[in-house]
């Protein structure tokens, strides 16, 4: 395991690649980001961003989405994959938002993860990017990058979230996750481009 000081040096190196890293999911509010993040499972942010303008024009809030016709909703989100499962989750999530939170997206991990279709990763995305609550989403890119760098030694997202959270100041959690995600998409891919990486001198994988 790296020390917090080593982790900060690694993060500074990665930030040179991805200054101002942020989520690539287009959204105007917490509800839209919540829906977009649910749709992003097993899909790409680009594909989700192609779908959501029409989706939000038809269902602008939880009250509208909870009453969606399943066939119509499935048609709108079909290209994101697993559209039937996602449609059920979105309608259930919207219904729960209305029933439990007056249609407002709650600003706590516990309340968010009680919503249908919402796990820790999705909750952390919404908390960190739309609600001003530090969150550290762990997806496959974060798992890959953090393990290769030697910051963590686990494939368990919950354990990795806790380990990274202990290495970085809470106020930086969301930016750390965004930076790792972009690095995993652009440079530290399944077949990594180590020669391009500014953090290679600090990386365990590059020195195996």
Image (spheres, rainbow, N blue to C red):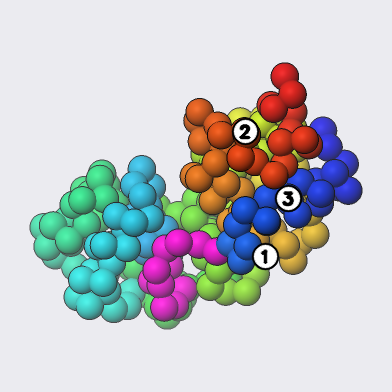
Which quarter shows the C terminus?
top right
Q: Identify the residue at horizontal 75%, vertical 54% (top origin).
A: 12
Q: Identify the residue at horizontal 41%, vertical 78% (top origin).
A: 28
Q: Residue tagged by mark 3?
A: 13
Q: Position of residue 97 (x, y in %)?
A: 41, 71
Q: Position of residue 128 (x, y in %)?
A: 60, 66
Label 3 close to label 2 by CB (< 8 Å): no
Residue lying furthest front in this view? 195
Q: CA distance from mark 3 to mark 2?
A: 13 Å
**For the magenta stretch, what is the residue range?**
22-33
Q: Residue tagged by mark 1?
A: 134
Q: Is residue 190 above or below residue 119?
A: above
Classify mark 3: residues with Cα within 10 Å, few (<14), some (14-19) or many (20+).
some
- Residue 194 marker: 2
Decide which of tag 1 and tag 3 comes sooner along the chain.
3
Q: Position of residue 87 (x, y in %)?
A: 25, 55
Q: CA distance from mark 1 to mark 3?
A: 22 Å
Q: Position of residue 161 (x, y in %)?
A: 67, 46
Mark in front: 1 vs 3: 3
Label 1 close to label 3 by CB (< 8 Å): no
Q: Quadrant of residue 65?
A: bottom left
């Amino acid at each position: 395991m790296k020390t917090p000081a080593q982790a900060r040096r690694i993060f500074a190196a990665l930030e040179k690649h991805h200054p101002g890293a942020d989520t690539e999911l287009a959204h105007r509010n917490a509800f839209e980001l919540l829906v977009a993040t649910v749709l992003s499972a097993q899909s790409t942010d680009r594909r989700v961003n192609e779908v959501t303008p029409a989706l939000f024009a038809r269902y602008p809030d939880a009250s509208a989405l909870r009453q969606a016709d399943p066939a119509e909703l499935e048609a709108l989100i079909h290209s994101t994959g697993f559209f039937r499962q996602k449609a059920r989750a979105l309608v259930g999530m919207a219904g729960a938002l209305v029933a439990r939170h007056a249609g407002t997206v709650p600003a706590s991990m516990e309340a968010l993860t009680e919503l249908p279709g919402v796990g820790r990763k999705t909750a952390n995305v919404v908390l960190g990017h739309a609600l001003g609550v530090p969150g550290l989403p762990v997806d496959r890119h974060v798992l890959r990058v953090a393990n290769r760098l030697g910051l963590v030694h686990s494939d368990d997202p919950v354990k990795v979230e806790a380990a990274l959270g202990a290495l970085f100041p809470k106020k930086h959690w969301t930016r750390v996750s965004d930076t790792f995600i972009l690095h995993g998409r652009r440079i530290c891919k399944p077949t990594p481009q180590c020669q391009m990486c500014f953090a290679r001198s600090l990386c365990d994988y590059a020195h195996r």
